[in-house]
Amino acid sequence: MVIFDDAIVLLKRALSNDLPGIDAHRMMAPDHRKPASEYLKEVKSYKTGCVMALLFPSETGEATLVLMERTGVEGDVHAHQVSFPGGKVEEGDEGFLMTALREVHEEVGVSSAEINVLGALTELYIPPSNFLVYPFVGYVSKRPDYNLSVDEVKNILEVPLSFFLASENKKETTFSSARGYSVKAPYYDYSGIKIWGATAMMIAELVALIESRD
């Protein structure tokens, strides 16, 4: 069990120091993945997005992570996958953090006034959707009162942070990519729901920061 109050103190400190970045990403990266810097040398242009790893305390005081199952929106290469709340930078957004906060409100109904921001994780390039994603970490003081965007969010997953620290929850299989080829990749098996790809890689960095307490 990862105690919420302890996790917040630890993450606030860890996020102000050097991040594990690529080394942590590799723990949950598909076989073919390269560092973001290598992809960005190859692409002429890309879109920019921001996400929020949002934590809250469970009834027992355990640090719990908010994830969402995406709907099957036409044209979404990540349809039906598990992700953090987040989306594309839009005109009028005053910085990447504002994008992340706006998207959390639009997708799951948590307002920026409720969220305490701890810092940022390492940016990550996502080839299938051609996005460079900037992830942030924040928390709310109690379980969110959700108001889901039915067009984008099928379901909310509330996953104890300790789940991601347990090695037995990490598995590997072959996925069908959005580009039509097979991808061998590790994933977190949450009650039969596969959390993989960029989301799993970002979670791996969050986990590495938690494990740095040892």
Image (spheres, rainbow, N blue to C red):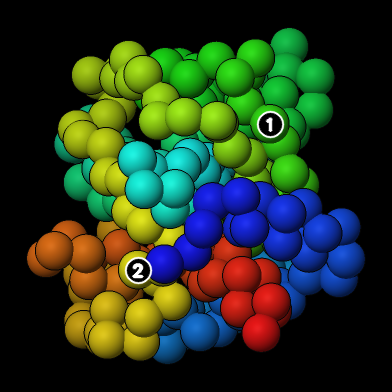
The correct choice, above or below, for 72 with respect to 158 in the image is: above
Q: 85 left or right of 177?
A: right
**Observer able to see residue 102:** yes
Amino acid tagged 1? Asn
For label 2, the residue is: 163
Viewport quadrant of the N terminus: bottom left
Amino acid tagged 2? Phe
Q: Earlier in the sequence, mark 2 or mark 1?
A: 1
Viewport quadrant of the C terminus: bottom right
Q: Residue at x 36, y 48 (%)?
A: 60
For label 1, the residue is: 116
For numbered disc 1, what is the local secondary structure? strand
Q: Residue at x 69, y 79 (%)?
A: 212
Front-most of residues 110 and 121: 110
Q: Quadrant of residue 102?
A: top right
Furthest residue in direction front, as rendered: 60
